[in-house]
Image: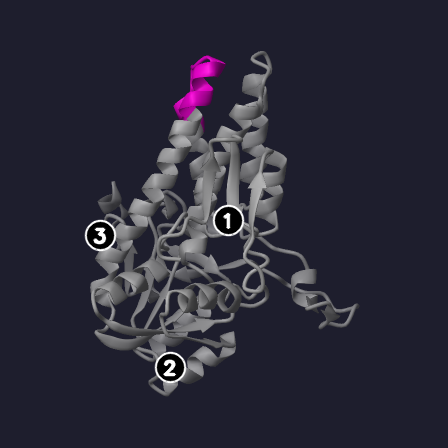
Amino acid sequence: MTEDKTLWWNDDNNSVMLIDQTLLPAEYKVIEITTVERLADAIRRLEVRGAPALGVAGAFGVALSAAHCLSDIEFSETIAADAALLKSTRPTAVNLAWGVDKVLRSMENLPPDMARIMSLFAAKTIAENDTKSCMLLGHYGAPLLPQIGTVLTHCNAGALACSSWGTALGVIRSAKKMGKSISVISCETRPLLQGSRLTAWELARDNIPVVTIIDSEAACLMRQGKIDAVIVGADRITKDAVFNKIGTYMHAVCAKYHHIPFYVAAPASTFDAGASESDIVVEERSRDEVANLFGRSTVPENVPVINYAFDATPLDLVTAIITDKGVLYPPYNFGDLK
């Protein structure tokens, strides 16, 4: 996954190409998306996921809408409706709306023909900058990891969560390139197993030593001294909390208790510095994701399920935030990102 793209624009068909992450690790399949409705469905179904990747997907979605809207009369209304649809699919991850809005701004007050050109240029620029940001994250974050050690990560913050390279896994990849001897413990990340299905697949493909554990095993391994650092990505960072895959908060609390550094790796586009934890809508997903596993019922039919997709980790549990602008330490000043 070091050089592979995980989603990109197809100039031949004016379409979006992406790896279907729901099929991994059993099947590697690239799908072509030609409509905004299909892209919105892919985002909801987690065929494409991860905060930076959603920013790129949202950007490409606006360009897709512009490219396939042949009516100049209905152009503005179509773009606005498609943009609203895309932003509604995943409310917690800030990058999705950020990518959509950035492309929309590039089209303001332009006639349709010029708007189509500018939307695609802006979307491709966002994708290119995402890869650059991930490389910078790796550059700034790699020195924080031990020369020899084991790093725990949760969910997937690798190339699959971006356009390439990755955020948390990008830091690990960069540390390996520096010559550090890093092995990884990947939490399985229930209920959809992004850690065991995606993170372990990426790292094994890059020949980076990786072991998968069940989520609730992490504290036990910390107590045994088998984890030297924790590094995760983020879906949104407010002025008081980091929103990431459910279970992140639990790892942060355990790391604090065991005096293990807890790092967050995220580009500046993931910061929502004007918002507080209480302002954010945390996505709740379907009961089915928890109550059924591999086609078998795992919860009695009359028992309800709470299935939050994300949790919030207070900033006082975070050792440092690795960004594409540099490393931030407490007390956090997000003005440094401008």
- Tell me if residue 331 can be seen: no
What amino acid type is highlighted by mark number 3?
A: Gly
Quadrant the C terminus occupies: top left
What amino acid type is highlighted by mark number 1?
A: Thr
User: Dot 1: what SS?
Assistant: loop
User: Dot 3: what SS?
Assistant: strand
What amino acid type is highlighted by mark number 2?
A: Met
In the image shown, does 288 or 248 lie closer to the viewer?
Answer: 288
Name the residue rendered at 27%, 49% in the picture: 324
In the rendered image, which residue does mark 3 sit on? 326
Q: Is residue 146 left or right of residue 213?
A: left
Mark sitting earlier along the chain (1/3): 1
Inter-mark Cα distance, 1 to 2: 29 Å
Inter-mark Cα distance, 1 to 3: 24 Å
Name the residue rendered at 41%, 83% in the picture: 221
Residue 158 position, x and y percent, is 40, 58
In the rendered image, which residue does mark 2 sit on? 222
Residue 227 lies, with reference to residue 158, above or below; the image says below
Name the residue rendered at 28%, 54% in the picture: 137
Name the residue rendered at 62%, 39% in the picture: 38
Mark 3 Cα shell of 10 Å, populated few (<14), some (14-19), many (≥20) = some
Residue 39 position, x and y percent, is 58, 40
Q: Residue furthest right?
A: 302
The main secondary structure of the magenta stretch is helix
Which stretch did the figure color magenta? 104-118
Quadrant the N terminus occupies: bottom left
Residue 204 position, x and y percent, is 42, 69
Which tag is nearer the camera, tag 1 or tag 3? 3
In the rendered image, which residue does mark 1 sit on? 92
* Labelled disc at residue 337: none
Residue 222 position, x and y percent, is 38, 81
Mark 1 Cα shell of 10 Å, populated few (<14), some (14-19), many (≥20) = many
